[in-house]
Amino acid sequence: MSTEEKSAAPRSLAEALRVRDDVSLAALLRSRPDLITPVPTDLTQLATRAGTRASVVRALERLDRFALQTAQALAVAADPAPYEELLRLMAGDPAVAADPAVAAALPRAVALLREQALVWGADDRLRLVRTARELLAPSAQHPSPTGLGPTVREATAGMSPGRIQEILAAVGLPSTHDSVSAVSALSALFTDRTRMAALLAELPEESREVLDRLVWGPPYGQVTHDPAPHLRALLDRGLLLPTAPGTVVLPRETALHLRAGRAHRTPEPVPPPVEAAATHRPQIVDATAAGQALAALATVEELLKDWDEGGPAVLRAGGLSVRDLKRTAVALDVPEPVAAFWVELAYAAGLIASDGEADERYAATPAYDEWRELPPAERWARLAGTWLTATRTPGVVGGRDAKDRTLSALGPNLDRSAAPEVRHRVLALLAGLPEGTSATEESLLARLHWERPLRAPQREQREDDLRTRIARWTLSEAELLGVTGRGALAAPGRALIGAPPPPHRAEPSGTSEGQASRGPGDKLPVHHHTPPPLAPLTPAEQAAATATAARLLAPLFPEPLDHVLLQADLTAVAPGPLERPLADLLGVLADVESKGGATVYRFTPGSVRRALDAGRTAADLHAFLARHSRTPVPQPLTYLIDDVARRHGRLRVGAASAYVRCDDDATLDEILADKRAAGLGLRRLAPTVLAAQSDPAALLEGLRAMGFAPAAESAAGDVLIARADAHRTPPRAAPEPVPEGPPAPDDTLLTAAIRAIRAGDLAATTPRKPGPPADEGDPPAANGDLPRTAAAETLATVQAAVLTGEALWIGYVNAEGAASQRVIAPIRVEGGFVTAYDHTADEVRTYPLHRITGVAELADDAT
């Protein structure tokens, strides 16, 4: 470099940031949002924050595998390192063999590291930020993934000068007068490919085998106090250097020679492709997903209907008990993990919550009633949008927390901040495949591990990796919810993540499902489609994407039916989804026996009594069935309704503790004689009245268990009608997702932040005249410190600047106590305020004089 080029080269990360344009700064702050919380006062503070350990660790965790390998190679390179040295470490020595794919991908990786402020400097002087070098450089306590050990200089730091001279003599180098030159000569030998090859050729085969075992790491080995001859040959020549008693290390220069200059055994410049598992017609995928979406809505409605009158009790520590989760799974006819998924989804969507009563229980919220009134596609879109962005992770239910406590459904500690990103990324990778194509799980996981290598352990430990488990749960949950169909992303699911619609595909004439689909055993192509961007959508974008998904799903749903098919075996078949009023009343009048494409309902004495308890009469039920059945009403069903209605309400139960009254004293005699009534504590008060020790609810259940059909009555003697939707919680807000670190800033915040940072930087770096200290004995203010002057001097300097039109450098503390530096051109001073043109903010502002810490005149050459 020439003298002018050297002077122009940045000498620090702050200087490198200072020459960036606003677009580049915005990219940095968008990729590392922790740097903008709070907004730095200037670029020097931004650079300092970008070099803190916590921020660097977070940035390294978000690098893909090849970018991380590039950073690891820079950590073992010279500081600074020219681009050519980095290329040799990544692609190999061109004199031996170089990987063209690595050479092609390396510029992108370096540009990414530069964008994230992990690397700065020109190509001939690449510098890894110091904190990143400390984290990635190899050491005995923290081995590097490169498998490289210390350099010759580092390994010989504590070695005696005599021993170093002995090594020089053994390798045929002349002795030197000091250890520094001796180590330099030895390093030069180990980095000279020709001389190093000759040195290794002199070794016995056993010695070269030892080097081969250490070359890819770990570079450390154990030796005895009297090593074997083949080990002695390596120690004498410095090819193995002692680091501690009984421990030796392979120097980095030797390892790089044996590796043909490569820092990594297997560089991965290209992400592994997502492989296709099966291909189906897009229409089949969309239809399958729509069927799953309908089933999902039915399942959530069934769950909420079961909890309408008050669901399970809330544990003292929060959440559902294991027993209640099992009961819910039995009621929904699903496995317990799937039941936990539906319960958590309804909770995350704000449809269920705790009622807050003294005897706290879970119940439906008022938002559930609003949700039920939405069209089916919009109801599904709300569930799917909630699932995509929720941080609560049902898959961890049943596991253990950090204190070895069981994680329960609806309980605390279920939030996993990585869940939304992983779900979005899994769906984005599926969207990158051709329409109707599903992916193999192994290739999908391999791609995720390439994109976030520091978040995943080694391959043999991936079973315990949280991101891997979330990805697997995403695939199964997306299928349950109808986001995917047969493993392929459906059109509504594609819209849900904001992916562009695929190009239209003409349907081949005469193609059947069997011809259009391929199974896992078929040989399928590997696809390299570029998936949508990794970053999840903003809330506004997500709302628009969810609305689009609902519009795409609506035509796939069948029209609701207004009829059922009654059968002689006391069942009714709904050949599709039913209209809301019909489904609501039929759900009260009959029990669901089986679900699927057609739902089967069964009429029982208990279900008919339930409809009568809800205020319906036998005539109402007969008219309802005749109106909505496409088949004649079977005679057994008519008899069932009439028989239950005839006996319904003959017994009346009220509060005494409780009582039973009946106009037919023979019925009361029958109850008293029944052994099953012993636990109710009944005794006759009058020929038509029995008193009970049980409460009315227990008495009702006991009599119904005995085969009677009692009705509850009020204190006035009126029959109480029990509505199925009687219990609701107070209005509850849905749980907020727990983000992983600061949220990504929007464009408005980025623009304002960059403007403020540049303004502060201008004020901090503008040359100014040195002034006297504010108080005797105080040192003069240095660049970067707020100016300090007495109040009288501040006022006089500002008034003089109004007359001369000169600009001033001021320190200012706002009402919140935040200090900043500004360059202003005062216009007028009055009433304790100075009105000035603020060069840093590029606008006219007014400042209270008492908030100005001090002023200083700018240097004559300041602009």
Image (cartoon, rainbow, N blue to C red):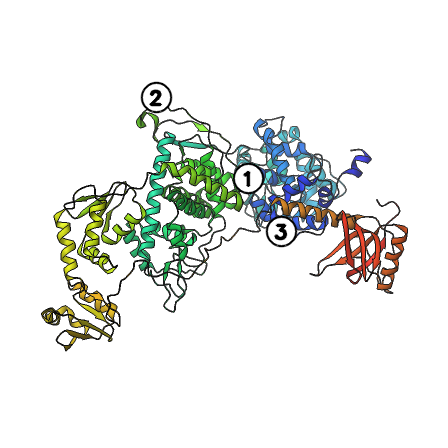
Q: Which mark is residue 509?
A: 2
Question: Relative to 90, is 684 on the left or the right?
Answer: left
Foreground of the two, 137 or 291: 291
**Can the viewer see residue 137 in this picture?**
no
Question: Relative to 655, is 683 on the left or the right?
Answer: left
- Please say if the residues under marks 3 and 1 sit with CB atoms less than 8 Å apart: no
Q: Is residue 582 above or below residue 658?
A: above
First in sequence: mark 2 vs mark 3: 3
The disc labelled 2 sits on which kind of residue? Ser
Residue reaching furthest to the bottom: 685
The residue beneath circle 1 is: 64
Residue reaching furthest to the top: 509
Q: Residues within 10 Å of mark 2 (few under 14, many from 20)?
A: few
> Marks 3/1: CA distance?
19 Å
Disc 2 versus disc 1: nearer the observer: 2
Residue 140 location (% of width, % of height) = 58, 48
Q: Quadrant of the N terminus?
A: top right
Residue 744 location (% of width, % of height) = 58, 47
Q: Which mark is residue 537?
A: none
Q: Quadrant of the C terminus?
A: top right
The residue beneath circle 3 is: 53
Q: Residues within 10 Å of mark 1 (few under 14, many from 20)?
A: many
- Residue drawn at point x = 26 percent, y = 72 percent: 715
First in sequence: mark 3 vs mark 1: 3
Q: Secondary structure at mark 3?
A: helix
The disc labelled 1 sits on which kind of residue? Asp
Quadrant location of residue 611?
A: bottom left
